[in-house]
C-alpha cells in the first residue's frame, strides 16, 4: 500500500465556475501533490463575471464535516477561505484552537477581482479577534490588508503595505504575505512579514488581464508547500512562482475573467505536438 500524500483540510465556499472557492483549492492542492479535504461553508451562484447569490451552510454542518475528518486522518495543514457567516468563523476558530499544532493558512477574501464583497465590518472584527490569533500564515492583497489593519478609511488611504502588515501582526498571526497586485507599480511586489518585520520581498512581471481565483490559487499553493514540509519563507516564494505560472497560462472559458490554469504543467505544448509528429511511427 502506498503512503498517503500530505492531507490538507479546506474550508471554503463552492464556486461552480471553478475559478475560485473549493474547486480552485482542490485543483491547486492536487496539482502540488496533496490530498484535499473540502469542507463546504457556503453555496454561491456565480460565473466568471461575478456572484449572483450566496447562501451560508449551517455552522453545525460545517463543524461536523471538519471534525469527522480530523478524527479520521492525519492533517498536515488547514486552509481557510470564504466562511460565509460569523457562526462559521466561530466554528473554524474553535477547531483551530483545538488543533494548535496544525498550521493554518488563512485567505479571508473580503473583495474579489470581480468586485464581489464577502465581508462586512462585523466579520472583519470577528476575524481579528477570533481567527487571526490561531493563524500561522495570512495571505491578503494590499487593499484588504489596509482594511484589516485599520477601521479608519482616511488612515487606510495613507497606509503602506509594510504598515498594514505590521498592524495585522498585532492581532496574533505569525506570518503575513501581502500581495501587490492592486498597487500602481510596474511589477507585482509581494512581501512576507513576521514578528520582526519583512522577511522577503519578491517581484513578478505584471501580467495583463483580470483573473478569477488568483488569490485562492496562491493561498492553496502556500498550504500545499507547507504541508509538504517546506519552511515558510521558501514556501512563499514557491507558491508565488506557481501562481504566476498559472496566470501566465490562464484561459478564458466564459464571458468574464480569465481562470488560472492550475494544471498548466500537464497540458501539451505546441512544441510537444511538433515533436510528437516527428516521432510518429509510419507503417
Image: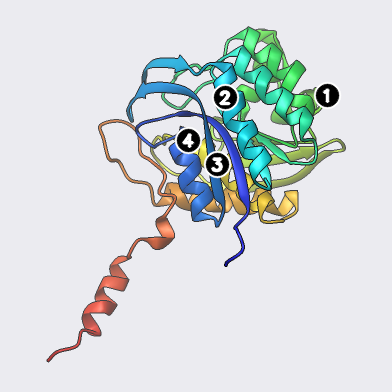
Q: Is residue 187 in sight in this rendering?
A: no
The reply, left or right, for residue 101 in relation to residue 4 is right
Farthest residue toward the right?
A: 196
Element assignment for label 1:
loop
The residue depicted at 55 percent of the width and 57 percent of the height is: 33
> What residue is drawn where x is 31% and y is 71%?
271
Q: Residue at x 55, y 41 (%)?
A: 37
- Choose the circle earlier in sequence order: 4 or 1: 4
Instruction: Please report whichever mark, 1 or 3, sits nearer to the chain's N-terminal start.
Output: 3
Q: Which residue is the site of mark 4?
A: 22
**Camera-side residue: 155 or 54?**
54
Q: Mark 1 = which residue?
A: 170
Q: Which mark is residue 62?
A: 2
Q: What x and y, as percent, mark residue 55?
A: 44, 15
Name the quadrant of the N terminus: bottom right
Separation of disc 2 and disc 1 at Cα? Answer: 28 Å
Residues tagged 2 and 3 counted as in contact (Cβ below 8 A): no
For label 4, the SS is helix
Alpha-carbon neighbours of circle 3 within 10 Å: few (<14), some, or many (≥20)?
A: many
Amino acid at each position: 500500500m502506498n503512503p498517503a500524500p500530505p492531507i490538507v483540510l479546506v474550508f471554503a465556499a463552492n464556486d461552480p465556475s471553478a475559478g475560485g472557492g473549493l474547486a480552485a483549492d482542490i485543483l491547486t492542492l492536487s496539482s502540488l501533490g496533496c490530498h484535499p479535504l473540502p469542507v463546504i461553508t457556503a453555496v454561491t451562484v456565480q460565473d466568471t463575471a461575478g456572484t449572483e447569490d450566496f447562501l451560508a451552510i449551517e455552522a453545525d454542518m460545517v463543524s461536523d464535516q471538519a471534525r469527522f475528518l480530523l478524527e479520521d486522518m492525519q492533517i498536515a495543514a488547514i486552509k481557510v477561505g470564504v466562511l460565509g457567516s460569523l457562526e462559521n468563523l466561530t466554528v473554524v476558530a474553535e477547531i483551530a484552537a483545538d488543533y494548535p499544532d496544525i498550521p493554518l493558512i488563512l485567505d479571508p477574501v473580503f473583495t474579489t477581482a470581480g468586485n464581489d464583497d464577502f465581508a462586512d465590518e462585523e466579520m472583519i472584527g470577528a476575524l481579528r479577534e477570533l481567527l487571526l490569533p490561531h493563524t500561522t500564515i495570512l495571505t491578503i492583497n494590499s487593499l484588504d490588508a489596509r482594511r484589516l489593519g485599520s477601521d479608519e478609511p482616511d488612515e487606510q488611504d495613507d497606509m503602506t503595505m509594510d504598515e498594514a502588515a505590521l498592524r495585522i501582526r498585532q492581532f496574533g498571526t505569525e506570518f503575513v504575505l501581502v500581495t501587490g497586485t492592486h498597487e500602481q507599480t510596474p511589477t507585482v511586489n509581494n512581501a512576507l512579514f513576521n514578528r520582526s518585520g519583512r522577511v522577503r520581498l519578491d517581484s513578478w512581471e505584471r501580467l495583463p488581464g483580470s483573473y478569477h481565483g488568483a488569490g485562492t490559487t496562491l493561498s492553496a499553493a502556500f498550504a500545499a508547500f507547507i504541508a509538504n514540509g517546506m519552511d515558510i519563507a521558501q514556501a512563499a516564494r514557491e507558491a508565488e512562482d506557481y501562481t504566476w505560472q498559472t496566470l501566465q497560462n490562464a484561459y478564458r472559458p466564459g464571458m468574464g475573467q480569465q481562470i488560472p490554469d492550475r494544471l498548466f504543467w500537464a497540458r501539451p505544448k505546441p512544441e510537444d505536438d511538433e515533436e510528437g509528429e516527428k516521432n510518429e511511427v509510419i507503417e
